[in-house]
Amino acid sequence: MPVVNDIAGAVEALERGDLVAFPTETVYGLGADAGNDRAVARVYGAKGRPAFNPLIVHVASADQAFGLGEFPKAARQLALAFWPGPLTIVVNRRVDCPVSLLASAGLSSLALRVPNHPVALDLLKAFGRPMVGPSANPSGRVSPTTAEHVRKHLGNKVAVILDGGRCRVGVESTVVSFLDDHPKLLRHGGLPRADIERLLGAALTIETRASRPHAPGQIDSHYAPRAELRLNADGPRPGEAYLGFGPFHTHGACSLSPAGDLVEAAANLFRLLHDIDATGVAAIAVAPIPHHGLGEAINDRLTRAAAPRPAP
Ligand code: TXA
Ligand code: MG
């Protein structure tokens, strides 16, 4: 399948019910017509998602999103402040919402986002309708931050790959839910929690998967490279590759951010995991990462990548 920036060709593919990989500022998405049940079902199939986890619906503007979901005042305020951008807002569907129920896995709610990437916005405007867009990787694997990652892992499943270069943010969007009186943070992501809380003037309730009570070892394995991961490591052991943070000079080691900058580290995270994994190394040791700002999202992804894998 060609890797070209053929927006018209991508729109035709979406209209036929085919899948289109597209760049966003966070990670590459696997796009399909959100109003077409068969196309949405093909997304689950292509990713090999074991369960019908609800998908994020991408639209070209906040106004388009307001036509699909019931936005309370605070949700509207967030949308207007941060869209286009790395924020997903969960609200109740409007009664006349044309999005496939399969996209929201049968829930009466809907996750909506306006991505901040010129190619994604061109595609969404030209298509004119909502598009589902989970990350364009096989389920449980590292999310793609280049068109080449998509080609390598899902190339035979998509009609078109739009190439927008390397993703600027590098981790998925922050997910905030407005289904009851108090907004909840469902996923740490590319928009730091503090930015959202500052705008709302209130703290978010944190209900990420990792925050829910669980026995050790029960965190879902997700975002996983093939290599085993060892976290909070001050250096590599024999046979391990090392992923550092800050300046790190051992031969062959690389750093998420030589400058110790969390924004740069987020942007590099999935790409470096892909690159190190491609060397065939058995284990990757990762330096401790600070927990503030985008460190919350980075630590969330690393913890899940290091969690015990389901049996093959
Ligand atoms: O950055 C991103 O958000 C990327 C790019 C491609 O836009 N997309 C992405 O999509 O990560 P996806 O479909 O993989 O995200 C699914 C997550 C679910 O795990 C869940 O946390 C949340 O979005 N979600 C979707 N629909 C929901 C709903 N109705 N209620 C609660 N959470 C929902
Ligand atoms: Mg994903």
Image: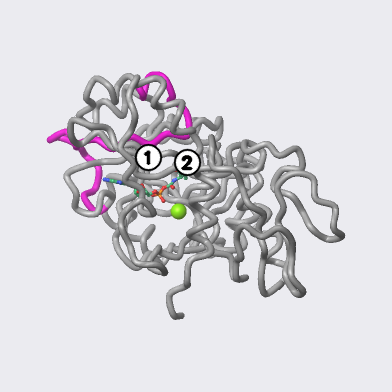
Nearer to the camera, 308 or 54: 308
Residue bearing the label numbered 2: 189
Instruction: Identify whether 110 is placed above or below 60.
Output: below
Kindly identify the residue that appears in the image at 71 percent across and 39 percent down. 260
Q: Which residues are magenta?
A: 78-102
In this rendering, position of residue 55 left or right of residue 115: left
- Residues at marks 1 and 2, CA–CA distance in whole angstroms: 7 Å
Instruction: Identify whether 189 is placed above or below 217.
Output: above
In the image, what residue type sits under mark 2?
Gly
Q: SS class of the residue under badge 1?
A: strand
Q: Do the numbered discs 1 and 2 sit on residues whose CB atoms are within 8 Å?
A: yes
Kindly identify the residue that appears in the image at 74 percent across and 50 percent down. 255
In the image, what residue type sits under mark 1?
Val
Q: Is residue 91 magenta?
A: yes
Where residue 175 is drawn, which disc sits there?
A: 1
Classify mark 2 as within 8 Å of ligand 1 or not, answering yes or no. Answer: yes
Task: Decide: few, some or many residues near mark 2? Use Cα within 10 Å; few <14, some 14-19, many ≥20.
Answer: many
The percent coordinates of residue 277 (x first, y second) are: 67, 66
In this rendering, position of residue 23 left or right of residue 286: left
Display coloring = one colour
The percent coordinates of residue 206 (x first, y second) are: 34, 41
The percent coordinates of residue 145 (x first, y second) are: 60, 48
Kindly identify the residue that appears in the image at 29 percent across and 57 percent down. 38
Instruction: Identify whether 57 is placed above or below 42.
Output: above
Classify mark 1 as within 8 Å of ligand 1 or not, answering yes or no. Answer: yes
User: Residue lying farthest front?
Assistant: 234
